Amino acid sequence: MTFIRKFLAVVAIALAHLSVSGQGEINFRNTADTLIFTNSAVGGAATGPITGLSGTTYFFGLFVAPIGTSDPSLFTFTGSYASNTSAAGRLSGGTSIIPGFDPGSTVCLLVRGWSANIATTNYPAVVSYLSNPTFVGWYGESEIGTLALGGGVSGSTSVFGTSPEQIGGFTLEMHPIPEPSSIAVAALGFAALWSLRRRSH
């Protein structure tokens, strides 16, 4: 009976290993040729790479979609985060598992980044901020890469690089506090006039 239990335990461990190794992998870090930048004005040119760890902290999420997807809204979060390193412009999330896709399969990948005052490793908070920015933050999306996943017996490929299939560097753009719309300003003006008129009667 003890032999059977040991045998079943070995089988369970082997199956668990196969289920993990059956997921595709990607190297989620960039290079000196694919730096991440920020700007200091909406729509403005990049002013420099993201700071190292002694400055502002930045976070990045890795998103995946089936091959041929070109609409960024159709990408789903892989669960993998990265953050900036001690080297300016660099990020590292290590080797990331891409759930639902086997090693060797080709997928579309997208990276989204934001400053830590927007959120840390909590992408829903980033979505909430973007729908109503109430303070100055930085956010950006990469181009879409189309890559064959590593994993299993093959090594991990890199999401960032200079080949046409890989993702290059990109810029996190300033998102300022939005100014009141002209309609809101007009409504406030009307309310003030109405209040003054009531006091004069």
Image (tube, rainbow, N blue to C red):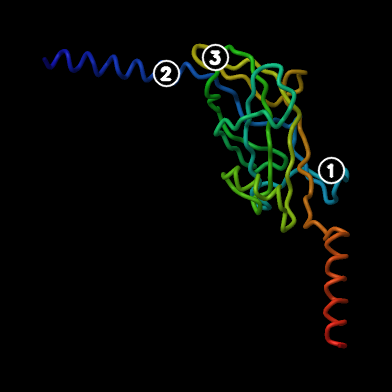
- In the image, 23 versus 69, the foreground residue is 69
Q: Residue at x 59, y 48 (%)?
A: 120
Decide: is 139 above or below 182: above
Q: List the residue tagged with mark 3.
A: 103
Contact check, label 3 and label 2, Cβ < 8 Å: no
Q: Amino acid at mark 1?
A: Ala
**Disc 1 designates what residue?**
46
Label 3 vs label 2: CA separation? 12 Å
Task: Kindly report the distance in space between the C-alpha atoms of the residues bearing marks 1 and 3.
Answer: 36 Å
- Mark earlier in primary sequence (3, 2): 2
Residue 5 percent across, percent down from the top left? 18, 17
User: Label 2 belongs to which residue?
Assistant: 19
How packed mark 2 is, by other alpha carbons closer than 10 Å (few <14, some 14-19, many 20 or more), is few
Q: Quadrant of the N terminus?
A: top left
Pointer 1 or 3: first along the chain = 1
Residue drawn at the location 71% of the way across and 23% of the way down: 145
